[in-house]
Image (tube, rainbow, N blue to C red):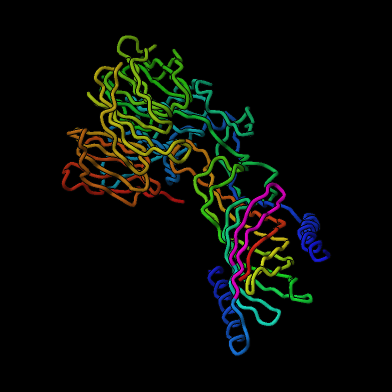
Amino acid sequence: MKKYLSIIARPFVFLLAAFFFSSCVKDTCRHTYSYTFYLPVYKTTAEVRANIKSNPAKEIQQPGKLVLLGNYIFLNEVDKGIHIIDNSNPSSPKNLAFIDIPGNEDLAVKGNTLYADLYTDLVTLDISDPLHVAVKKYNEGVFPDRVYINGFYADSSKVIVDWIKRDTTITQDCSFSGLVYNVPGIWLTASAAQSSKNSPPTATGQGGSMARFALVGNYLYTVGYSDLSVFNITNSNDPLYTNKIQISWNVETIYPFENKLFVGSNDGMYIYNINASPSNPPKAGEFTHARTCDPVIADDNYAYVTLHSGTTCLGYTNELDVVKLNNLTDAELVKTYNLTGPMGLSKDGDLLFICDGTDGLKIYNASNVLNLQLIKQFPGLETYDVIAYNKIAFIVAKDGLYEYDYSDVNNIHLVSKLSIIN
Amino acid sequence: MRSKKFMLFLLIVFNASIANAQNKKVIFHSINSFGFIIGEKSDDLQIQSVNGVAYKNFFSGIGFGKDDYSYDSYPLFLDQRIYFGKRNNGFAYGNVGYNLTAKNKPGKEVYYYNSYHFSNGVYTDFGFGHKMKLTKKTFFILSAGFSYKDINYKIGVINPCLTALCTVDYSNYKYGNGRVVLKAGVDF
């Protein structure tokens, strides 16, 4: 009897032991986080405006969007200004000057006039002499999306002209915060940019597919986070802010083609007809897709939409969608091509150029959109945007501005590279 | 590299135990158990298999198991036991080893990431137990102990930016779990 009692009692001994150990039970989590933040450097508005001129050339550090006009390349230095590059000899482009425009991310050029964003303002510049550009007008507060968020508030009486980089590492208990995204510096919500096609009487700069500015005739169209703004530029030096049209959320790019505006957003492509009422264009059609980022270009019959994930783009889609524009109200997906991480794209004749992320630049024969043929690939470039114009492809990449000659499709070759300093 | 060195160390210790015991009376044992893990935030299960040799009232072996508590892992450890009592029925044990990570996904504490990588940590388990004879060479085993495991992972979070090539910030998380483990198994 005593033996059986002993056997029955044993499990209780272990439960007692478990109770003894329970005081040691504890889950811990330590979070070590290394991050970089940027402290703003301020100047007064007067100081900033006095410096918007052709200053000595600066090294390219963080190239953004670009516009081509004649022999010149206007290349955005993200949040800093615009490089003016003399490209009269594509094999040896010369960095001529730099226009200091804090907060600049987008630009457009029409004739001798350059339009650029300065945070929430639009600044108009006379560039008839690129070495002596002159400010003609400020349209203040026309890009209200360009504000600082994420807990950061700029001194509104001044303008941020630069950022001082600070690296730091913190260790804390995980329970302190779920997602630590502790950047006291900057997160800009939206921007504006460059672009254009068409050949109105006054020469218009050729922009890329990542543009948020578009010039058509006497109008400048810009897209914000959720809207399309219209400026009347009949008098080039005196843009008049005439209209604002709600589009969708997460608008990213705008591309003009033959009296149509193709607006790319996170969830689709929207087509606006500017033929009848350019100051108040109605929506003519749309093509929706998975939620992701999508630069778009178009030709007479098709729109080409690259969808990419990663960066701030949601989704997992990386592809090229070819959309048939039967009529504007009935855009139809006709073919999808899988890609790696496509961003900017450009088309010249039957040649389609695609910046495919880390896969570099891909050039396709697009004579048959249902069967694109890869002609050439330049791997090793981390490409962002491309403009194919006048037999030269201009590529903005992580490490520089490249120019490729494609006058002979069988011998597409590098002509020059403007390197980026780090 | 560290993990390889540690595995090598375990093998050397284990082989040394066997070599030392070859000239004397040693008995191979396989101890297989299910465990019930009582943690701060949840209860979970584990399964283990320890294989080694017993000499007199000592046992040395290498164990491998699956541990479902918090982030799943596969502990690989050195097991040492000492038996005591009138019939050597009681024992104290200690496990020290490596906590090999399973293919986990980041937890809910990280909502927005673009990359993650789990890496291995430490595994320990100390306690005592009791074995009861079932057949001539088979024993039923009960044990209770305190176990600690940790696991590390690194997550990359994208800094939102307007143009391409956004920078990525990296976070390192180190999770430590101290738990009570009740095990029941068979030694044969």
Q: Residue A356 magenta-drawn?
A: no
Indicate the quadrant where residue A175 lies.
Answer: top right
Highlighted magenta segment, given as a residue range: B29-49
In the image, A6 versus A108, the foreground residue is A6
Q: Residue at x 28, y 24 (%)?
A: A332
- Does residue A9 appear left or right of residue B12 in this picture? right
- Total labels drawn: 0
* Residue A159 image point, x, y percent: 58, 32
Quarter that holds the N terminus of chain A: bottom right
Q: Is residue A316 left or right of residue B111?
A: left
From this viewpoint, which residue is outermost toward the right? A2
Where is residue A198, by image quadrant? Answer: top left
Task: Tell me: residue B126, above or below residue B115.
Answer: below
* Residue A107 in view of the camera: no
Residue drawn 26% across and 20% down? A258
Q: Position of residue A266 (x, y in %)?
A: 43, 29
Q: Is residue A265 among the parts visible in the rendering?
A: yes
Q: Give the residue displayed 58% in from the left and 76% down from the top.
A: B9
Which one is nearer the viewer's eye here, B2 or A71? Answer: B2
- Left or right, residue A352 beside residue A306: left
Q: Position of residue A280 (x, y in %)?
A: 39, 11
Q: Is residue B36 magenta?
A: yes
In the current view of this chain or complex, which residue is farthest to the bottom?
Answer: B23
Q: Nearer the viewer, residue B175 or B76?
A: B76
Looking at the image, the residue that sits furthest to the top is A276
Instruction: Name the residue rendered at 70%, 49% in the picture.
Output: A173
Q: Quadrant of residue B20?
A: bottom right
Q: Nearer the viewer, residue A32 or A417?
A: A32
Q: Is residue B152 left or right of residue A103?
A: right
Q: Measured from the top left, where is residue A388 in percent x and y?
A: 26, 36
Q: Main secondary structure of the magenta part?
A: strand
